[in-house]
Image: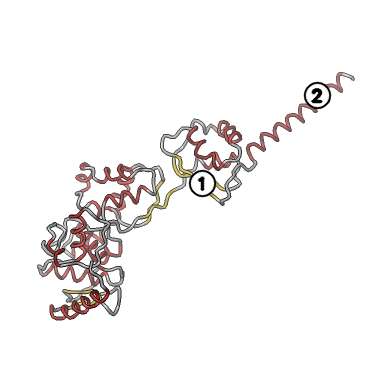
C-alpha cells in the first residue's frame, strides 16, 4: 500500500476514534443521570461539607456516580462545594446536576402563634440548618437584647408571624438579625403614631395583641376585643384576661403542653407577673406571638363603651359584650351553664 493511502487511512482512523471518544464524553456529560421516580427532589448540603460528603448525599439520586465525578472535576466543583438547599429534576444529566448544585434554592420559612422562645426555636430549626439550641441562645444573647431594646420576657415581640424567604444554610445569628430588621420594618411611622395615640409602646402593643389573639380566633372580632382591653386600661381597671391566667398556670407548672379550656377560681390565685387578675396593667411580655391582624387590631381598635365580654353560647367562636356588670353577669351565667352541660371541667 502506498504511503499516501496509509496516511489517508490513518487520518480517517484518527477522526473516527476522536468521534467515538467525543461521543462517549458527550454521553457521559449530557445523557440523563438520575434514578429517582419523583419529578424533582431537594437535597441539603451542610455548611463546611467536602466533596466526598456531597457524593454520599447525592448518591441515592444518581444513576452513575462515576459520570458525575468526571463532570464535577472538569467543572472544578470538587474544590468549590457550596452548602444549602438544591433542586434536582428527574432526567437531569451530570452537567445539569453540577450546575444545579451551584444554585442555592431559597426556603419559604413560616411560623405562627408560638407561646415560648423554646417552641419558636424548635419550629425554625425544622426549616433551616441551624439547630434549636443555637437559635435559642442567639435569641437570649444579652448583648443583642440590650442593643435592640428587648428583654428575655419581651423578645418574642420581635418575631412577626409571616412567611419569609431565607437560604437554608443561614446561621442562627444571621436569622436573628434578619428578624430584627423585619421587626423594624413592620413598625412604620404610621404604626408608631397609632401606638402613641393609644399611649402604648410597640412592645406594649405586642403584649396586648397577644392577649387579643388568644381571646378570639375571629379576626373580625379582634378590634372590638382590643377596644374592651383599652377601655379597661384607660379607666384604671385590671385587664383580668383569662389567657394571661392560663399562661401563668402553664409557666408556673412548667407544663406548656397542658390544655386548659376552663379557668378555675384557684387559677386566679396563681402568683405570677403574667396574671392580670392580680396585677395591674400589661404583663411583662407577650403570652404568645400575636399575628399581624391582632397587632393591627390594637392599633385600630373599635371605639365603644364595652368593658366586659364573655364567650357566646349562640354564636360560637364569638363573644357577647356588655357595658355594665349586670349585663355581663347575665351573659356569664349563660356561658357557665353551657360549659357545665358540656362536662368541661378543665
Query: Where residue 111 sits: x, y (%)?
Result: 35, 55
Query: In which quadrant is the C terminus drawn?
Result: bottom left
User: Which color scheme does this rendered protein use?
Assistant: secondary structure
Query: Where residue 6 sits: x, y (%)?
Result: 85, 21
Of tags 2 and 1, which is closer to the observer? 1
Which residue occupies the foreground of this view, 125 or 85?
125
- Residue underneath mark 2: 10
Query: Where residue 32 sits: x, y (%)?
Result: 63, 43
- Residue underneath mark 1: 87
Secondary structure category for the residue under label 2: helix
> Quick check: 245 above or below 7?
below
Residue at 70%, 35% in the rendered image: 23
* CA separation in Å, label 2 and label 1: 47 Å
Horizontally, is 152 left or right of 56 in the view?
left
Query: Where residue 255 sits: x, y (%)?
Result: 24, 55
Horizontally, is 10 left or right of 108 in the view?
right
> Quick check: 342 above or below 4?
below
Compare marks 2 and 1 and give the one earlier in the sequence: 2
Horizontally, is 237 left or right of 48 in the view?
left
Which residue occupies the foreground of this view, 37 or 151?
37
> Quick check: 314 above or below 92?
below
Residue at 44%, 35% in the rendered image: 49
Residue at 32%, 48% in the rendered image: 178
Horizontally, is 170 left or right of 339 in the view?
right
For this orientation, the residue located farthest to the top is: 3
Amino acid at each position: 500500500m502506498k504511503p499516501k493511502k496509509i496516511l489517508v487511512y490513518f487520518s480517517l482512523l484518527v477522526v473516527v476514534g476522536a468521534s467515538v471518544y467525543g461521543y462517549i464524553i458527550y454521553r457521559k456529560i449530557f445523557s440523563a443521570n438520575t434514578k429517582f421516580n419523583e419529578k424533582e427532589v431537594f437535597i441539603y448540603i451542610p455548611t463546611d461539607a467536602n466533596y466526598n460528603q456531597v457524593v454520599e448525599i447525592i448518591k441515592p439520586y444518581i444513576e452513575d456516580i462515576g459520570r458525575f465525578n468526571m463532570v464535577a472535576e472538569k467543572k472544578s466543583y470538587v474544590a468549590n462545594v457550596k452548602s444549602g438547599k438544591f433542586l434536582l429534576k428527574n432526567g437531569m444529566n451530570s452537567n445539569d446536576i453540577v450546575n444545579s448544585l451551584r444554585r442555592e434554592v431559597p426556603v419559604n420559612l413560616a411560623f405562627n402563634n408560638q407561646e415560648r422562645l423554646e417552641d419558636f426555636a424548635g419550629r425554625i430549626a425544622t426549616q433551616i440548618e441551624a439547630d434549636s439550641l443555637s437559635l435559642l441562645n442567639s435569641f437570649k444573647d444579652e448583648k443583642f437584647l440590650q442593643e435592640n431594646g428587648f428583654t428575655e420576657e419581651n423578645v418574642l415581640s420581635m418575631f412577626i408571624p409571616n412567611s419569609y424567604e431565607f437560604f437554608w444554610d443561614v446561621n442562627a445569628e444571621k436569622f436573628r438579625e434578619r428578624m430584627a430588621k423585619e421587626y423594624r420594618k413592620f413598625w412604620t411611622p404610621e404604626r408608631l403614631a397609632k401606638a402613641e395615640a393609644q399611649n402604648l409602646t410597640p412592645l406594649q402593643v405586642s403584649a396586648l395583641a397577644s392577649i387579643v389573639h388568644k381571646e378570639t380566633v375571629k379576626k373580625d372580632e379582634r378590634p372590638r376585643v382590643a377596644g374592651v382591653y383599652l377601655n379597661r386600661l384607660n379607666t384604671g381597671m385590671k385587664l383580668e384576661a383569662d389567657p394571661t391566667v392560663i399562661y401563668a398556670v402553664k409557666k408556673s407548672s412548667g407544663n406548656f403542653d397542658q390544655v386548659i379550656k376552663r379557668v378555675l377560681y384557684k387559677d386566679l390565685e396563681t402568683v405570677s407577673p403574667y396574671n392580670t387578675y392580680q396585677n395591674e396593667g400589661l404583663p411583662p411580655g407577650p403570652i404568645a406571638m400575636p399575628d399581624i391582624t391582632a397587632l393591627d387590631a390594637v392599633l385600630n381598635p373599635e371605639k365603644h363603651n364595652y368593658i366586659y365580654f364573655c364567650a357566646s353560647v349562640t354564636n360560637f367562636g364569638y363573644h357577647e359584650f356588655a357595658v355594665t356588670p349586670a349585663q355581663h353577669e347575665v351573659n356569664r351565667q349563660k356561658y357557665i351553664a353551657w360549659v357545665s352541660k358540656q362536662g368541661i371541667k378543665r
